[in-house]
Image: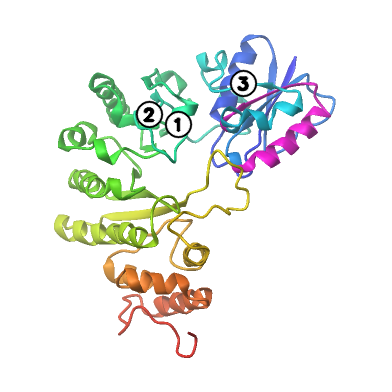
């Protein structure tokens, strides 16, 4: 039997590890699998299809693809994040719906042979689930039980980079963490590992000096934490400082906004990144870069295709203003790397009041263009007033 594996994600950044595990399972049954990323399988060539879904805001597109697949293949199974969280959106399609992890496929290692070219990295889970029950996160529904799992067998051959999808690695039992660290440090010593990325970020609230000592030496690239709300204030700064003191210098911090935050506390959280960059660089006498990665909150259990959701402490003007500032201002692929406080204040204002004024400014796009031009000609940003709105433009 020939099986089509279809990833419906619009812009897949990484290979779909779940579909690769299905490929191994199907191969054990004697079936042949072909992967289709963001495209439809050809007509009259396949006997069955497994379709993976991801973000709920992409459900309309996934449904449209499934309908097209059904014209070509009769036996269609749908799984993944959206199918688990909102299965009723797929029930009228006369497909088999798998909620959560596929019980058969999860027992297998990924089949990397179905990728168009050998992977340059491995994707693994050392654990499933999370000990937190964050209101904005659906891991508690997708993976309700937190447990450790064997991950070494899932490594792709001939790769020296690992992306871990763990939701909360630091919450594992001490013995399990120590085992992971021994394996990773041994791989590094044997020159089989050059970079580790816990893509879902580490839990800053669990970080302490003892844990920092334990994981020190693992080639994190980058070190990721989250500063999703003011409940993580102080924990975030402490976690970054502990890791910077142990030699790490490249940090990317997820910063949720448009949820229960306000524009004022978003300003504070972003400013803390530049303050830490400046302070730690001075104290440790080497470059430390703490980048912010602002992430727009969109409701997961609704289909917000147009990014219409508005946080209760935001206005539509403020939301659009900050969105324009990110798109036309200093961000690089969504990240803010602003050096010290002077550069931060040049872009975001000296205080919350100036930040609010900025994101309410009707010509913010033009202002960003002028600021970018000024910064190109004046790298030190040695301006009399870093927050400049042109005369006559109010």
Left or right for 164, reference 215: right
Location of residue 89 by image quarter: top right
Q: Residues within 10 Å of mark 1 (few under 14, many from 20)?
A: some
* Whole-percent x, y for residue 236 in the image: 26, 47
Image coordinates for residue 221, horizontal then vertical, percent? 35, 43
Looking at the picture, does residue 44 appear above or below residue 390?
A: above
Helix, strand or loop at mark 1: helix
Q: Are marks 1 and 2 in contact (CB under 8 Å)?
A: yes
Q: Residue at x 40, y 50 (%)?
A: 260
Q: CA distance from mark 1 to mark 2?
A: 7 Å
The residue beneath circle 3 is 98
Q: Which mark is residue 130?
A: 2
- Residue at 42% x, 56% y is 335
Is 77 within the magenta? yes
Q: Which residues are magenta?
A: 57-81
Q: Is residue 315 above or below residue 102?
A: below
- Residue closer to the observer: 212 or 134: 134
Q: Earlier in the sequence, mark 1 or mark 2?
A: 2
Q: Is residue 150 left or right of residue 299?
A: left
Hey, which residue is sitting farthest bottom in the picture?
A: 392
Q: Which residue is mark 1?
A: 139
Q: CA distance from mark 3 to mark 2?
A: 21 Å
Give the residue drawn at x 47%, y 67%: 325
Which residue, as the protein is rendered here, is positioned at the far top? 29
Most prominent secondary structure in the magenta stretch?
A: helix
- For mark 2, does the 10 Å Cα neighbourhood hold few (<14), some (14 to 19), or many (20 or more) residues? many
**Lateral position of residue 233 relative to residue 13, left or right:** left
Q: Is residue 116 magenta?
A: no
């Amino acid at each position: 039997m020939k099986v089509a594996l279809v990833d419906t994600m619009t812009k897949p950044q990484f290979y779909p590890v779940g579909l690769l595990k299905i490929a191994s399972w199907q191969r054990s049954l004697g079936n042949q699998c072909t992967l289709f990323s963001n495209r439809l399988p050809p007509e009259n060539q396949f006997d069955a299809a497994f379709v993976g879904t991801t973000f709920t805001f992409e459900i309309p597109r996934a449904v449209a693809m499934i309908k097209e697949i059904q014209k070509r293949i009769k036996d269609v199974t749908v799984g993944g994040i959206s199918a688990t969280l909102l299965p009723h959106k797929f029930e009228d399609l006369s497909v088999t719906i798998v909620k959560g992890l596929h019980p058969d496929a999860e027992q297998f290692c990924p089949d990397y042979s179905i990728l168009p070219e050998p992977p340059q990295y491995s994707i693994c889970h050392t654990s499933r689930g999370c000990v937190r029950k964050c209101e904005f996160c659906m891991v508690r529904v997708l993976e309700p039980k937190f447990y450790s799992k064997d991950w070494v067998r899932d490594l792709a051959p001939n790769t020296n980079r690992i992306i871990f999808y763990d939701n909360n690695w630091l919450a594992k039992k001490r013995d399990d963490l120590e085992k992971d660290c021994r394996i990773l440090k041994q791989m590094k010593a044997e020159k089989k590992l050059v970079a580790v990325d816990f893509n879902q970020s580490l839990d800053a609230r669990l970080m302490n000096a003892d844990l920092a000592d334990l994981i020190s030496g693992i080639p994190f690239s980058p070190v990721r934490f989250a500063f999703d709300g003011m409940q993580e204030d102080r924990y975030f700064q402490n976690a970054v400082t502990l890791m910077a003191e142990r030699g790490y210098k490249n940090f990317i911090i997820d910063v949720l906004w448009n949820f229960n935050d306000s524009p004022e506390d978003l300003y504070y959280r972003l400013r803390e990144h530049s303050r830490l960059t400046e302070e730690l660089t001075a104290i440790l006498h080497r470059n430390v870069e703490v980048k912010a990665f602002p992430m727009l909150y969109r409701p997961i259990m609704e289909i917000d295709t147009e990014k219409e959701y508005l946080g209760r402490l935001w206005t539509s003007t403020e939301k659009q203003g900050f969105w324009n500032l990110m798109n036309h201002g200093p961000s690089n692929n969504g990240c803010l790397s602003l050096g010290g406080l002077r550069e931060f204040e040049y872009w975001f204002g000296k205080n919350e009041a100036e930040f609010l004024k900025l994101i309410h400014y009707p010509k913010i796009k033009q202002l960003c263009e002028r600021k970018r031009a000024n910064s190109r000609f004046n790298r030190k940003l040695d301006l009399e007033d870093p927050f400049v709105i042109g005369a006559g433009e109010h």
